[in-house]
Amino acid sequence: MNFLFQLTTHWQFWAFFSALAAAMTAIFAKLGVKDVSLDITTIARAIVIVTCPISLI
């Protein structure tokens, strides 16, 4: 538990996680969403961005 606390207090961890989330957003945006409504894809990307940090807690 102490290791996880120390890891999450460093800005490098959050910078890496932010870059990873941005990359995942770009990848999901490129995946076969051309036949799906723009509103649905925006909601899906928002859900992915919100659930990634929550999964770390």
Image (cartoon, rainbow, N blue to C red):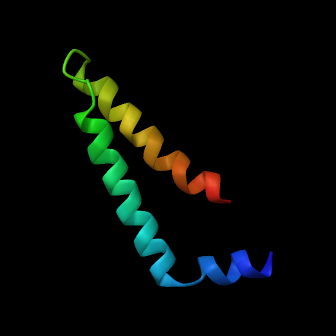
Residue drawn at 44 percent across, 48 percent down: 49
What is the x, y in percent for residue 21? 40, 55
Query: Is 55 displayed left or right of 42 in the figure?
Result: right
What is the x, y in percent for residue 13? 50, 76
What is the x, y in percent for residue 30? 23, 35
Query: Is 20 displayed left or right of 27 in the figure?
Result: right
Residue drawn at 48 percent across, 82 percent down: 11
Query: Is 56 displayed left or right of 16 in the figure?
Result: right
Q: Residue furthest right?
A: 1
The quadrant where residue 10 appears = bottom right
Q: On the rendered image, what quadrant is the C terminus found in?
A: bottom right
Report the number of numbered marks: 0
The quadrant where residue 23 appears = bottom left
Q: Is residue 20 above or below residue 16?
A: above
Q: Is residue 30 above or below residue 1?
A: above
Residue drawn at 23 percent across, 26 percent down: 38
Q: Is residue 48 above or below residue 21?
A: above
Query: Is 56 displayed left or right of 24 in the figure?
Result: right
Q: Residue furthest top?
A: 35
Q: Is residue 20 above or below residue 36?
A: below
The quadrant where residue 18 appears = bottom left
What is the x, y in percent for residue 20? 39, 59
Q: On the rendered image, what quadrant is the N terminus found in?
A: bottom right
Residue drawn at 45 percent across, 65 percent down: 17
